[in-house]
Image (cartoon, rainbow, N blue to C red):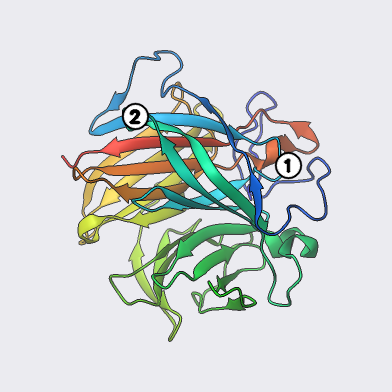
Amino acid sequence: MRRIAGLALALALGSCAAPMAPLPLQPVAVGAAIQVDAEAVPMDPSDPGRERIGNFTYAGGLVLTSRQTSRLHGLSDLKVSPDGRLLAIGDQSDLLEARVVLDANGRLAGLTDATMIALKETTGADLYVGGQREYDSEGIARLANGDILVSFEQHDRILLFARDGALPRPVPQPDVKFTDNKGMEALIAAPDVAADAYRVGLEDRGWTFVCRISTTCVRDRDLDLAGSELVAMDNLPGGGLAYLLRSYSVLRGNVVQLRILDRTGRLVDSLEIARPLTVDNLEGLAAAPQPDGRVRFYLVSDDNFGFYDGRPTGQRTLLLAFDWTRP
């Protein structure tokens, strides 16, 4: 969950949403099916026919809404499997599962078979009931056995949600002093290390760690953030990693950068998304390998529920897709 940075005309990015519009205490029923409405958006509203940036091809973009629930907001991270199954976490501990719908040309067209549930605390109570410091969920990963990991800020911790429905439990996390509300923003499984391994990235420092449920966490790669913040990452074929970085300035607004590094840490390619392109508070990333060798990157935005200090911000829940061909 992010604060929104300055300017009444461009309240768009920051860290930790302030008071919002009233929301139901019980967000959604367990396993509740919802309909997700999708409105297509171009990559560049000033040039709707534009679809290429370097080695990246725009594969469709959507504004997501729902008339079944007030909870389809604040999406902080997502993962998408090659078969199109989507897993996303809202920053108030709502778990969204759905299937990506493609059109006849393979472009992103919508979501179907969507369900949303409210995650539980280790005690069995809804995390949402515990208040903002307890429910501020940011990163999500699915391990090979189907268990789900979720990282949290403010009350910094990582919880494991077992596929058998058992109560969640904490798992190892980096042994560092976290900056308040700028902690474990990025989270992915690390099957290249072990079946129970995962990687964690710190938002404000760019430090990453390799952790295992069975042991502990060790320092891994440090990223040069160059004034940005690390908000998400995902695995790539061949052992590379993709990182999503974001920044905000009065002059440029939201600036989001996708960096692709090989297994040695060498920069292979990058993509910058900023005005006049369609952009918002993009902070979730998924990399889905395609049969033809390309990688499809899905990016999702946290709209902070559309409010800051009780005022509407005009933010949207965007789901964007870009196909990358290795240079």
Q: Position of residue 138 (x, y in %)?
A: 57, 57
- Rounded to the nearest whole Å, what is the CA distance between mark 1 and mark 2? 29 Å
Tell me if I can see residue 186 in this picture. yes
Residue depicted at 73% across the width and 53% down the height:
28
Residue depicted at 29% across the width and 30% down the height:
57
Compared across the picture, whether 104 is left or right of 320 comes to left
Q: The disc labelled 1 sits on which kind of residue?
A: Ser
What is the total number of numbered labels drawn onto the structure image? 2
For residue 58, the mark is 2
Residue depicted at 60% across the width and 73% down the height:
165
Please tell me which of labels 1 and 2 falls first in the chain.
Answer: 2
Q: Position of residue 304 (x, y in %)?
A: 66, 42
Q: Is residue 104 above or below residue 114?
A: above
For residue 70, the mark is 1
Q: Position of residue 288 (x, y in %)?
A: 33, 49
Q: Is residue 247 above or below residue 11?
A: below
> 184 or 214: which is nearer to us?
214
Task: Identify the element where label 2 is drawn.
Answer: strand
Compared across the picture, whether 259 is left or right of 159 comes to left
